[in-house]
Image (cartoon, rainbow, N blue to C red):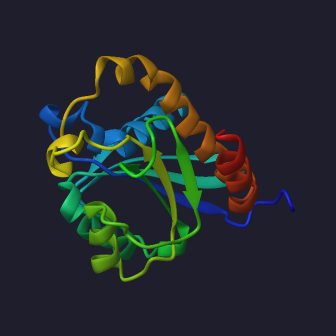
Amino acid sequence: MEDVNKHKRWIIVGLGNPGLEYSKTRHNLGKMVVQHLGHELNWPFKKDLNTSNEIARGVVNGVNVQLIIPMKFMNESGRAIRLFLGYYRLSAEELIVVLDDAALPFGTLRLREFGSAGGHNGLKSIEEHVGTQRYVRLRMGIGQPKTGQDLADYVLERFSADEEAQLPEFLDKGTKALKHTIEHSVDLAMNLVNTKDC
């Protein structure tokens, strides 16, 4: 497997909901990972009122990287991403979307080059407004709700005490997966993330 950069630019989107009441909920895990990456790189986020996003920009190993936090709610995030891509004349093939995934156990990561929305409202919105499934996505496992609990309620809950204790390590794993993708290739990053779990 070749260790090469296939892209000279990546647009990394962290899905979540705006507002302090949602800041530490499971549905905001994608947003938290991208914010954590920005903090590690020492890149400040600034509001881009033209595109309804918070944006941080920089260069990693010669690759132009833009970190995006949509300022819209999860089910409208595709609108903000479409606006960003159109305003700056960028391609959806340069997207990496980071999101929570209730189908994966907490602490598990899965990196994919493309795929379906799988019931996730953020991905459904992207597919509807951007018009493609062909973009990279990093799924961060949050585990399943208890029997009888509604999924919508579960994802909007705060992390449990046990999950909270593991969260720093999980955020580190997510940022490491993104760095592998930026610095090498999607194929190599998938091999590292999906087989060794970063």
- Is 91 on the left-hand or right-hand side of 68? right
Q: Position of residue 93 (x, y in %)?
A: 54, 73
Q: Is residue 97 left or right of residue 2?
A: left
Q: Nearer the viewer, residue 50 or 38?
A: 38
Q: Classify 3 as above or below 144.
A: below
- Residue situated in front as seen by the camera: 121 or 130: 121
Number of labels in the image equals: 0
Residue at image location 55% in from the left, 52% down from the top: 110
Q: Quadrant of residue 145?
A: top left
Residue at the spot x=45%, y=47% of the render?
104
Residue located 52% across and 24% down the image: 169
User: Which quarter shows the C terminus?
Assistant: top right
Is the residue 96 above or below the residue 88 in the image? above
Taking the image as shown, residue 96 lies to the left or right of residue 123, namely right
Q: Is residue 42 visible in the rendered structure shown here?
A: no
Q: Is residue 196 visible?
A: yes
Residue 101: where, in percent of width, then height? 39, 50
Report x, y in % for residue 79. Answer: 24, 70
| Residue 127 picture quarter | bottom left
Q: Nearer the viewer, residue 96 or 46?
A: 96
| Quadrant of image for the N terminus | bottom right
Find residue 62 and report its horizontal and vertical position in percent: 71, 52
